[in-house]
Image: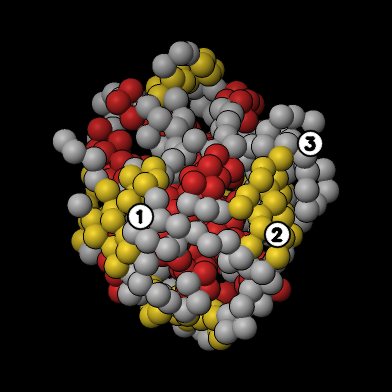
Amino acid sequence: MSEKVWEIEPSGPLRGDVTVRGAKNAVSKHMVAAMLGDAPSTIRNAPDVGEVGITTAMLEHLGMGVERSGDRLTITTGPVAEPNVPKAFTGLNRIPILMLGPLLHRAGEAFVPLVGGDPIGRRPVDFHVDALRALGAEVEIAADGIHARASRLRGTRIELPYPSVGATETVLLAAVLAEGKTVIRNAATEPEIVELALFLQRMGAGISFSPERRIVVEGVDRLHGAETTLAGDRIEAFSYLVAGLVTRGEVRVHGCPQDRLVTAITTLARMGARFEITDDWIMASAPRGLRPAAVQTDTHPGFATDWQTPLMVLFTQADGMSVLHETVYENRLAYVPALKSMGAEIEVYDTCLGGPACRYHDTSALHSAVVRGVSKLRGGDVTMPDIRAGFSAVLAAAVAEGPSTLRGVHHIERGYHRPVEQFQNLGLTLTAR
């Protein structure tokens, strides 16, 4: 089977409207949460992304029913004959490890293959495993995956070494049906975490948020089905706003609440972007050009790590020297060589630039970048290494001189809702073949 590629011809400023669906980082977690109910659950505003298909296949293997109708997903629970996620799912995404808690509740044992997702840095399973052990599970890490067993999970106090989104989700999904109270300290507080907690609360879970990254879960005996409508994807919304800015056009993004983009909007405004914001949409333009900036990524409510890949391309079109300091994933800048091959003037460093010392300050991780703009980008033949880097390659190709060929497009299709259609509607000459 031949590799799928996108051919892109720069076609001037991108203009128009984009409606974003629910977040890739939310929909699959809600699908896993639905495993815990004793009746069907419905998730509305679900995006049409590869991540949903991968998670659907896992759930169906475990005996769950998944039905899609338009933007609605209905998950029906059933008996788990074999509580094993097949090894064929190894490395495809981060979802299998989140299934450990639900499978322990439903079957008393579980096997899941090793975590995957984008190659942006280590995603240590230690936080997940330590948390499950604290809740009373026997967990063994093997070369091919993780085996777990528990007759009953019991509430406990868990302090996460870092406010990891995935580890916080693992604890929530395991603690809601555990016996007694679980207190999570140093929990992640990203909007997708809150959204998952609200869904679990609709299913009957006892969850409360306290100051200083503390979440308290009061275990219950059973959860029922629930319905929810996902809020718009803040990463996708930001990406399309930048698509307009980087090409000197303007894109109006519908479907993502302003409160999910507060830090992003302020960052772009400091660079010279002008915004129009209503209850229904957000539009950005930069009629007088863009100024450079120094930006540090951080856990919520800081500047999200998934926002920095499109921002890096925007830096190449800002007039001056910009600095990016990545503090969440140590290998997030692995896509920079692809941009440099297209003419971007970027240098990466293993020191902490543009912000205080982070947890990578005494490592050899290349986690800071200095970008010189305005760079004249040129078309190229680029392979996308991951979802977010894939979008940045599209942006670079849209503003470059000459055509580009982008490979590895399955990455971007795993995380963005119908990207070919969206970009074509904004006026980009993009051919998928």
Whichever of labels 3 and 2 marks the residue nearer the N terminus, that label is 2
| Disc number lying in front (3 or 1) | 1
Mark 3 vs mark 2, CA separation in Å: 20 Å
Left or right: 178 in relation to 15:
right
Q: In which quarter of the view is residue 362 placed?
A: top right
Whichever of labels 3 and 1 marks the residue nearer the N terminus, that label is 3
For label 2, the SS is strand
| Disc number lying in front (1 or 2) | 1
Residue 424 seen: yes
Residue farthest to the left, as pictured: 1
For label 3, the SS is loop
Q: How is the image coloured?
A: secondary structure
Above or below: residue 91 compared with residue 385:
above
Mark 2 is surrounded, within 10 Å at the Cα level, by few (under 14), some (14 to 19) or many (20 or more) other residues, namely many
Above or below: residue 109 compared with residue 68:
above
Q: Which amino acid type is marked by label 3?
A: His
Residue at 53%, 62% (x, y): give it: 376
Residue in front for this viewpoint, 130 or 294: 294
Residue in front for this viewpoint, 267 or 190: 267
Mark 3 vs mark 1, CA separation in Å: 36 Å
Residue at 58%, 80% (x, y): give it: 286
Q: Which residue is mark 3?
A: 361
Above or below: residue 88 compared with residue 99:
above
Q: Which residue is mark 2?
A: 322
Residue 191 seen: no
> Where is residue 4 shown, x and y percent of the image?
24, 45
Q: Which residue is mark 1?
A: 404
Q: Which amino acid type is marked by label 2?
A: Ser
